[in-house]
Amino acid sequence: EAQVTQNPRYLITVTGKKLTVTCSQNMNHEYMSWYRQDPGLGLRQIYYSMNVEVTDKGDVPEGYKVSRKEKRNFPLILESPSPNQTSLYFCASSFGVPGEQFFGPGTRLTVL
Amino acid sequence: DQQVKQNSPSLSVQEGRISILNCDYTNSMFDYFLWYKKYPAEGPTFLISISSIKDKNEDGRFTVFLNKSAKHLSLHIVPSQPGDSAVYFCAASDPTGNQFYFGTGTSLTVIP
């Protein structure tokens, strides 16, 4: 089944404790992206990747890092999480750009 | 600053009637627009898209209209069905096709 998977689905952590949210797609998509969804703000793009080893900042990249060492994986790294990064995070991928993106199920992160 | 706006947080329509969801954008450089549907506890799913060279695109019960001079797009659902009840997000991409900007969403309720 074609899908985008994210892990973990739920995470509660404390300020400053490094964490990684994994994202993987099995559709051989070149483009991948991370978004966060907050009430009243919709989805905002954090980072995107056009292909392996090619990444760039989206609208709200501060406090986040990404890497794209393999085509299928695009992890989101929070080196020192803060409470304002409490949010619902979505990973997405598409075959080309611009194109319809396939979204993962979301990761709900709470930073205390 | 929100570059894509959905000014109606919610909309209720009777089953069988037309649902019209609206979206405005501020950046005249946006050239590809998409609508996504989102159910609770799931990621958004792609619905329909339109390129800036068109003013209308149709897919079954869903039609998207684009008015570039007004920087406005709308999604028409005819006839509306209870299964259409969801949150609808409009999105726009920059000319590179890599950066996406989403609206804040409209929650549609179709009443049986």
Image (cartoon, helix red, strand yellow):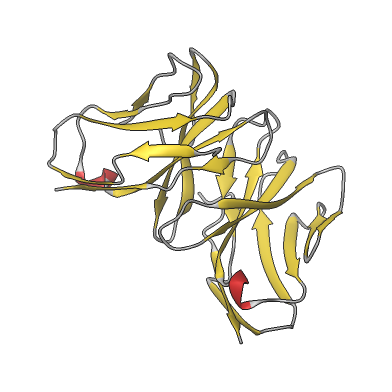
Q: On the picture, is A8 further left or further right than A83? A: right
How many marks can you see?
A: 0
Q: Within the image, what quadrant is residue B14 found in?
A: bottom right
Residue lying farthest to the front in this orientation: A1
Which residue is at the front of the view, B47 or A1? A1
Residue A40's x, y, as percent? 43, 61
Q: Within the image, what quadrant is residue B83 found in?
A: bottom right
What's the residue at 78%, 66% (across, down)?
B61
Q: On the picture, is A54 further left or further right than B49? A: left
**Is residue A12 in sight in this rendering?**
yes
Q: Is residue B107 above or below residue A87?
A: below
What's the residue at 40%, 19% (across, down)?
A67
Which residue is at the front of the view, A1 or B101? A1
Residue A30's x, y, as percent? 59, 23
Q: Is residue B98 above or below residue A67?
A: below
Residue B90's x, y, as percent? 62, 55
What's the residue at 39%, 47% (across, down)?
A106
What's the residue at 48%, 38% (across, down)?
A4
Q: Quadrant of the N terminus of chain A?
A: top right
**Is residue A62 in sight in this rendering?**
no
Q: On the picture, is B45 further left or further right than A43? A: right
Which residue is at the front of the view, A57 or A26? A26
